[in-house]
Image (cartoon, rainbow, N blue to C red):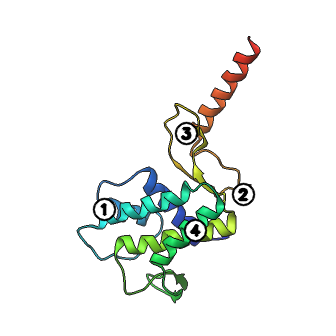
């Protein structure tokens, strides 16, 4: 059962854009399609740059030092983006809520609204701690800076991938072996 598909897909989309930034606007729009967005966006020459700003602002939420800071930053993003919630039925998706002004269909503005509200829904329904950077990258010398969007049942996902989790396990194993061999 999905507790919150709106929040989940939006925060996963943001994490995907943060970890693998598309080269151009078309790449951003293609990524929105991969994550289930069906709407058409109006086009502006600065969409790529402005969408990068949206992701950079969102990354400040990811990197916030604590829950109160995270909530404050996320509230600021939502204040910039949201209008009153609206019921809508478009593209044969069925009735659902939009948390943005229906008259503004620019790519960066829609993504700011979807990502900020989706992240808030994710953090309030699953836990404020369920958004972070990969734990592997917190070890000196490890280059991973990927975002971890924890959608696991138990809420304990710390690594962005099996590869990073395995690399950390090998490090721990080697550290234990070097202690016992001395």
Q: Mark 2 falls on what kind of element?
A: loop
Count of marks overlaid on the render: 4
What residue lies at 59% left-to-right and 70% top-to-bottom?
120
Q: Nearer the viewer, mark 4 or mark 1?
A: 4
Give how far across and how far down residue 154 sits, in percent: 74, 55
Q: Which callout, 2 or 4, points at the residue further toward the start of the chain?
A: 4
State how far apart marks 3 and 2 are (Cα). 23 Å
Sequence-wise first label, 4 or 3: 4
Asked if the residue under mark 4 is in contact with the one under mark 2, i.e. CB atoms within 8 Å, the reply is no
Q: Is residue 119 above or below residue 83?
A: above
- Classify residue 106 by image quadrant: bottom left
On the question of residue 109 being in view, the answer is yes
Residue picked out by circle 4: 72
* Alpha carbon distance from label 3 to label 1: 27 Å
**Which residue is disc 2 drawn over?**
153
> Is 153 or 73 nearer to us in this picture?
73
Residue at the spot of label 3: 137
Q: Earlier in the sequence, mark 3 or mark 1?
A: 1
Disc number placed over residue 49 in the picture, else none = 1
**x, y percentage for residue 35?**
47, 64
Are the two marked residues, 4 and 3, in contact with CB atoms closer than 8 angstroms? Answer: no
Q: Give above or below for 116 relative to 61.
A: below
Q: Earlier in the sequence, mark 3 or mark 2?
A: 3
Outermost residue, left side? 45
Q: Earlier in the sequence, mark 2 or mark 1?
A: 1
Q: Nearer the viewer, residue 84 or 39?
A: 84
Q: CA distance from mark 2 to mark 4?
A: 26 Å
Q: Residue furthest right?
A: 180
């Amino acid at each position: 059962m999905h507790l919150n598909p709106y929040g989940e897909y939006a925060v996963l989309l943001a994490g995907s854009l943060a970890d693998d930034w598309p080269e151009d606007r078309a790449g951003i729009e293609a990524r929105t399609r991969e994550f289930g967005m069906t709407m058409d966006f109006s086009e502006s020459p600065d969409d790529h740059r402005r969408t990068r700003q949206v992701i950079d602002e969102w990354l400040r939420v990811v990197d916030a030092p604590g829950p109160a800071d995270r909530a404050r930053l996320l509230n600021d993003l939502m204040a910039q983006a949201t209008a009153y919630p609206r019921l809508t039925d478009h593209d044969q998706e069925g009735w659902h809520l939009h948390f943005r002004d229906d008259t503004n269909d620019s790519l960066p503005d829609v993504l700011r609204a979807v990502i900020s509200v989706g992240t808030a829904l994710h953090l309030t329904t699953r836990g404020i701690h369920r958004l972070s950077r990969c734990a592997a990258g917190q070890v000196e010398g490890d280059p991973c800076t990927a975002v971890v969007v924890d959608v696991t049942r138990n809420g304990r996902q710390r690594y962005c991938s099996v590869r990073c989790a395995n690399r950390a396990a090998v490090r721990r194993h080697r550290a234990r072996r070097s202690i016992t061999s001395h």
